[in-house]
């Protein structure tokens, strides 16, 4: 069932699995404000019984990043150019960037697990979109790069937090400051990729992972995800307490005593 198909984004749902597809392969799935709004809308219309969301890109590249048209004086039709945005009030610029970021935030919500199936280029905004997901399954030809700093900008689409969490501060700084490519072997070794497979096996590997995630009871997965996502910000004792509380909820539920 197709729930959304607009501005280079297609959302389909089959049972407990949703697939969000970047569907502009002729432009290597380059991103624009319209695409970001469509991604945000996909998160809003996601049915409540969906448990796993797969993000993929059509064609040879996952996403080559921001469409360079954004930096031209004319920008995109019907959109303020980035140059005009920069000339406007600071609060207005902040609000616009915050709106763009919404396309990258819902992927880590507690009630779903999200998987990025990444092949070819995942550059800049494309890299950050892959980082927005909980898990990444990559083809052997994957090439990640954070090019924003090389262009005089910063990665601002929520990618810095997960990148540091996955590879550590020093490596994250080096990747961003140099803009170099991170290929499959390094991505797997450093934790950027949960799994690397030959390109022709990418869809099958994602399907296998999805099936494994669906095998566990939904509420147990939700509680476990909440424990893990909150672990970094809690002390050891706070995490112990969170584990006890979560397990208490699970035991009461299994005993038929939940509200």
Image (cartoon, grey):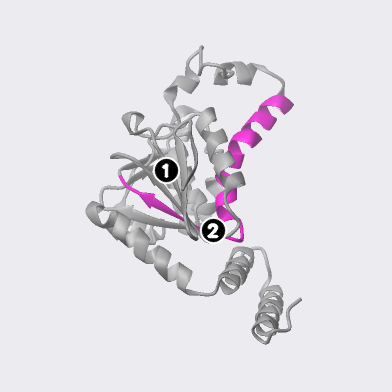
Q: Residue 65 is drawn in which quadrant?
A: top left
Q: In this image, 252 relative to 160: left or right? A: right
Report how far apart the C-alphas of labels 1 and 2 lie in the structure: 16 Å
Find residue 107 and report its horizontal and vertical position in percent.
Answer: 55, 51
What stretch of residues is rendered in magenta? Answer: 91-119
Kindly identify which numbered label has been placed on residue 169.
none
The residue at the far bottom in this view is 255
Quadrant of the image occupied by residue 104: top right
Residue 17 locus on image (x, y percent):
47, 58
Pointer 1 or 2: first along the chain: 1
Does 136 sit left or right of 95 as displayed? left
Location of the C terminus by quadrant is bottom right
At a point 44% along the width and 33% down the height, the residue shown is 8
The number of callouts visible is: 2
Q: Secondary structure at mark 2?
A: loop
Circle 1: element type:
strand
Residue carrying label 1: 21
| Residue 31 on image: x %, y % | 46, 32
In the rendered image of this protein, does residue 55 appear above or below residue 16?
Answer: above
Magenta highlight on residue 95: yes
Mark 1 nearby-residue class (10 Å; few <14, some 14–19, many ≥20): many
Residue nearest the viewer, comparing 79 with 51: 51
Q: Which residue is mark 2?
A: 50
Q: Is residue 195 visible?
A: no
Q: In percent of the image, x 48 and y 59: which residue is there?
A: 15
Most frequent secondary structure within the magenta stretch: helix
């Amino acid at each position: 069932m197709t729930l959304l198909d607009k501005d280079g984004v297609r959302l389909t749902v089959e049972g407990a699995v949703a697939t969000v597809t970047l569907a502009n392969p002729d432009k290597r799935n380059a991103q624009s404000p319209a695409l970001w709004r469509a991604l945000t809308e996909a998160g809003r219309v996601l049915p409540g019984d969906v448990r796993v969301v797969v993000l993929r890109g059509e064609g040879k590249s996952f996403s080559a990043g921001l469409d360079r048209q954004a930096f031209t004086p004319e920008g995109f039709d019907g959109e303020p150019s980035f140059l005009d945005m920069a000339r406007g009030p600071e609060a207005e610029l902040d609000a616009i960037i915050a709106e763009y970021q919404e396309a990258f935030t819902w992927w880590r919500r507690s009630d779903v697990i999200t998987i990025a199936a990444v092949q070819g280029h995942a550059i800049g905004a494309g890299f950050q979109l892959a980082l927005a997901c909980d898990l990444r399954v990559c083809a052997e030809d994957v090439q990640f790069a954070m090019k924003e700093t090389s262009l005089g900008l910063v990665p601002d689409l929520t990618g810095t937090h997960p990148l540091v969490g996955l590879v550590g501060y020093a490596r994250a700084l080096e990747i961003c400051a140099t803009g170099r490519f991170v290929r499959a072997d390094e991505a797997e070794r450093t934790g950027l990729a949960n799994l690397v497979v030959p390109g022709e096996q990418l869809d099958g590997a994602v399907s296998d992972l999805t099936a494994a995630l669906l095998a566990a009871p939904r509420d147990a997965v939700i509680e476990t995800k909440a424990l893990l996502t909150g672990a970094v910000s809690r002390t050891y004792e706070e995490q112990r307490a969170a584990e006890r509380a979560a397990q208490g909820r699970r035991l009461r539920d299994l005993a038929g005593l939940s509200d």
